[in-house]
Image (cartoon, rainbow, N blue to C red):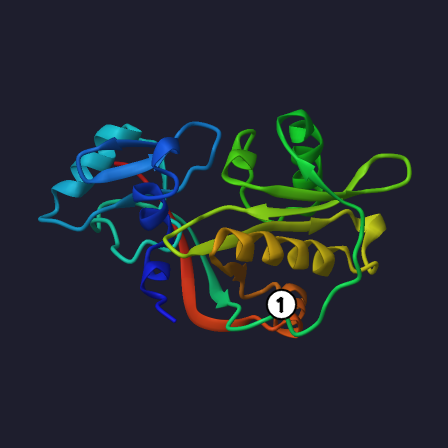
């Protein structure tokens, strides 16, 4: 199993499956506005950081996710979060009970943003669903109770992201059901699933490991400000 593309999942996605959602200057690339804030650079002689400055603008945030190449020392770091990257080496270890899973799209963005604001699974913007597919589970009253989707897509891989459940609906197995549905979608694409999780999110790590995911590598999520 070749996992090399997972060393720089943002850069690999921007150059490949997400090229249509990218904007570039020289060796620097980022996503279109409101898709996601992740940026990446192709390592060179140092001029790639000048390219990123021209792309983002002085004073702008530079969300470098788990970029393997750090920026120059004079770029102020604004956040740092320890996490890990997990992959699914084989089949799911358990088959979650099927739920009424629905596809989410542009018409559902307001509800998706509300759910993210309540549950805080990670960054999610008005056009993030375009990276998808994104799937959800609704209650009997039609309210969106849980969702998850595909975000980064380096060659051969699809990242499961934004796994979240409304507080009043937790304990019903919705997260496992959505992950299972996405694993099936990813397999149909010919890809393998992977995901990222904050080290402090022990409940999520326990769920993913129960489903058969295994840690590939620790990662550090980092954000900077363009000087």
**Left or right, 121 with reference to 63:** right
Establish if 30 lies above or below 196: above
**Left or right, 117 with reference to 69:** right
* Residue placed furthest toward the top: 107
Instruction: Tell me if I can see residue 58 in this picture.
Output: no
Q: Which is nearer the eye, 18 or 60?
A: 18
Q: Which is nearer the eye, 156 or 120?
A: 156
Q: Residues within 10 Å of mark 1 (few under 14, many from 20)?
A: many
- Identify the secondary structure beneath mark 1: helix
The image shows residue 102 at horizontal and vertical percentages of 73, 41
The image shows residue 213 at horizontal and vertical percentages of 56, 70
Instruction: Tell me if I can see residue 143 in this picture.
Output: yes
Quadrant of the rendered image containing residue 143 = top right
Q: Which is nearer the eye, 182 or 56?
A: 182
Quadrant where the image shows the C terminus: top left
The image shows residue 76 at horizontal and vertical percentages of 31, 45
The image shows residue 45 at horizontal and vertical percentages of 8, 48
Q: Which is nearer the eye, 155 or 140?
A: 155
| Residue sitting at x 19%, y 40% | 27
**Left or right, 156 with reference to 75:** right
Establish if 144 lies above or below 57: below
| Residue sitting at x 44%, y 56% | 157
| Residue sitting at x 75%, y 64% | 96
| Residue sitting at x 61%, y 68% | 205
What residue is pinned by disc 1? 208
* Residue placed furthest toward the left: 45
């Amino acid at each position: 199993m070749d996992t090399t593309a997972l060393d720089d999942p943002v850069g690999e996605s921007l150059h490949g499956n997400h090229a249509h959602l990218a904007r570039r200057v020289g060796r620097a690339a980022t996503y279109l506005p409101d898709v996601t804030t992740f940026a990446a650079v192709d390592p060179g002689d140092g001029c790639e950081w000048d390219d990123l400055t021209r792309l983002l603008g002085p004073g702008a945030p530079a969300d470098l996710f788990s970029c393997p190449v750090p920026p120059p020392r004079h770029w102020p770091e604004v956040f740092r979060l320890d996490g890990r990257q997990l992959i699914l080496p084989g089949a799911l270890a358990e088959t979650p009970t099927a739920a009424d899973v629905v596809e989410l799209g542009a018409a559902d963005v307001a509800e998706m943003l509300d759910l993210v604001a309540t549950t805080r699974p990670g960054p999610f913007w008005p056009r993030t669903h375009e990276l998808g597919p994104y799937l959800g589970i609704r209650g009997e009253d039609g309210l969106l109770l849980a969702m998850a989707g595909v975000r980064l897509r380096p060659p051969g891989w699809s990242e499961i992201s934004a796994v979240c459940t409304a507080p009043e609906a937790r304990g019903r197995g919705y997260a496992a059901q959505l992950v299972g549905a996405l694993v099936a979608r990813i397999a149909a694409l010919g890809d393998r699933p992977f995901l990222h999780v904050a080290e402090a999110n022990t409940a999520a790590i326990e769920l993913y490991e129960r489903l058969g995911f295994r840690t590939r590598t620790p990662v550090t999520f980092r954000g900077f400000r363009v000087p």
